[in-house]
Amino acid sequence: MIPWRLTSLSLALAMLAAGCATTLEVAVTDKNYCPFLGSALCARLVEGKDPSRYSSAGPNASLAYLRYVNANAQWSKYKSVMLQPVTFWAGGDDKISAKDQLMLTNYFYQALEKSLGSAFTMVSEPGPGVMRVQVAIEDVTTATPVLRSISMIIPQARVLATLKLAATGTYPFVGSAQAETKVTDSETGEVLVAAVDKRVGSGAMTSAAQWKYGDAENAMTAWSQQLSDRLVGWTQGTAKP
């Protein structure tokens, strides 16, 4: 029997740390990342600031875990975005069906289009001042819906979930997603920014009861807003790369 005082303290700390974030940014540990970006560009990626496990989308969202930013990019000239279809890069042993891959890429594209479209003119052809945005889903794991709900809602189970978070960096029964992003000058092909990031489901009560791809979708929503926020800050000069 876990003392109630310990239970209350654990729950309070978990809720304070996770806040309202629906996903947590975690380290990219897969040594085979960058199937989309390619080895040459991948070699230029550097680790950003230590990822905040409790970061959320928005202006204060943490940087991608691995990233490259062109130091010579003239950000102020870019006013438009040409968004390419999102692709799914998976190995031969991937367990995500072709139907679900299509569903996830469509969801990600729509999230990106909504976020970027609120700040930039969306175009379909290359041209002056147009950024080409390409995004690839590299990996997705599913959540276990019923067990996820139990681990978040029942106090004793939430204590154990919090202990797992402290030990491993993730909650139990959550899903995850990893993606690669490349932004280039649409005319010259010059790489402006590239990144690889991974997110897992958080301990937010709002995401306790959801379907198996809910955590992956929340990650894609967070990435979409994060990318838009970064590009707005850089092109308008309100933030430094």
Image (spheres, helix red, strand yellow):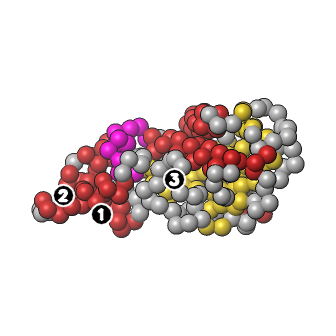
> Does label 2 or label 3 sit earlier along the sequence?
2
From the viewer's perspective, is 97 left or right of 156?
A: right
At a point 31% along the width and 56% down the height, the residue shown is: 16
Considering the image in quadrants, where does the N terminus appear?
Answer: bottom left
Tell me which corner region of the image, top left, top right, bottom left or bottom right, holds residue 33. bottom right
Magenta-drawn stretch contains 1: no
Magenta-drawn stretch contains 206: yes
**Residue designated by label 1:** 163
Nearest the viewer among 65 and 61 is 61
Crowding near the residue tagged with mark 2, few <14, some 14–19, many ≥20 C-alpha atoms within 10 Å: some
At a point 51% along the width and 47% down the height, the residue shown is: 57
Q: Position of residue 15 (x, y in %)?
A: 30, 53
Residue type of the residue flagged with mark 1 = Leu
Q: Which residues are magenta?
A: 202-212
Residue type of the residue flagged with mark 2 = Ser
**Residue designated by label 2:** 8
Compared to 169, does 75 lie above or below? above
Q: Tell me the SS state at disc 1.
A: helix
Crowding near the residue tagged with mark 3, few <14, some 14–19, many ≥20 C-alpha atoms within 10 Å: few
> Does label 1 or label 2 sit earlier along the sequence?
2
Question: Any mark on residue 60, and which?
Answer: 3
Point out the residue furthest to the right here. 188
Residue type of the residue flagged with mark 3 = Asn
Foreground label between 1 and 2: 2
